[in-house]
Amino acid sequence: MKKPLLMFFCIAIPAYLLSSFLGLDDYLNLLGPTKDIIKFTLLAGFVFIMVEFWRSDTTTDDKLFWTIGTLLFVPIALPLMYFNKLQDKKQSTKGCYTSGTAITAQEDTSDLNQGNIEMQKALTLPQKAAYFSLSAPLIADFIISLTKDAIKVSKISYVVVNVTLVSVLAAGFGYGIYSLIYSKRQKKIIIPAMIGISCHLIIAYIAYAGLG
């Protein structure tokens, strides 16, 4: 029962938040007082998603990364969280070992690989942060192209879109700096992080020049 609920809320919450852009506002207004019930239900659903996510086997670093990302831009992060984290299939631990030798061999192999596993876990979050920093300008451009008509006719939409854009770009720049600090001199982290930070600086310079 949990998986269908998680899928429903991870899709319904972004759809509700983007209802003005999807042309669903008129239909929601027809619901009258029921609209408030929907709001509280979706809010409870968001809390349910975060509780289930923090109860999962995901590492603490991943939990912090996805939680911050979700709070910054819910419509994008919730579907990604569902398909990338909440849908992970747990590996089966069932097996039959008939000798003590087999168990010992498995433990020895696990000990030998423990160092590599820890290293991979330590680099997972900085690598994701670097890729997000690289993709943040593209996400911002996609948001602009999606909402360019809506912001012309609604001041509220204009403010919401601008706050979202600033949040995405600020998060991208912050994640880029974070990935550089914890990159451990890995080129697969440093290169996308440097490109992402450079793009953010160029965007900031263009925006500053436009204000001047």
Image (tube, rainbow, N blue to C red):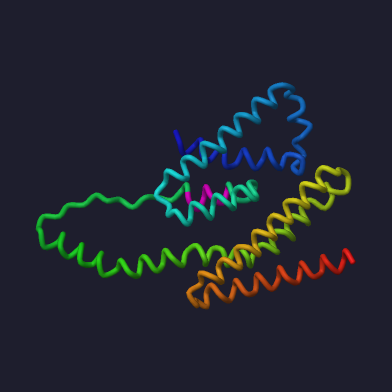
- Confirm whether the magenta stretch covers residue 81: yes
Residue 179 at x, y percent in the picture: 55, 68
Tell me if 185 is positioned left or right of 211 in this view. left
Place of residue 90 in the rendered image (x, y in percent of width and height, measured from the top left): 36, 50
Residue at figure coordinates x 65%, y 28% from the top left:
38
Residue positioned 72% across, 24% down in the render: 31
Is residue 29 part of the magenta span, yes or no? no
* Of residues 176 and 76, the one drawn nearer to the viewer in this rendering: 176
Foreground of the two, 87 or 171: 171
Say left or right for 100 vs 26: left
- Image quadrant holding the N terminus, namely top left
User: Is 202 above or below relative to 157?
Assistant: below
Residue plotted at (39% across, 49% down): 57
The picture places residue 103, in percent across and down from the top left corner, at 16, 59
- Quadrant assignment for the C terminus: bottom right
Which residue is outermost to the top?
33
Q: Is residue 72 above or below residue 183?
A: above
Q: How many marks?
A: 0
Q: Quadrant of residue 156?
A: top right
State which region is magenta: 79-85
Q: Point out residue 22 in the picture as x, y percentages from the top left corner.
A: 74, 42
**210 sits left or right of 127 in the view:** right
| 146 sits to left or right of 84 | right
Residue at 10% in and 59% down: 100
For the stretch drawn in magenta, the main secondary structure is helix
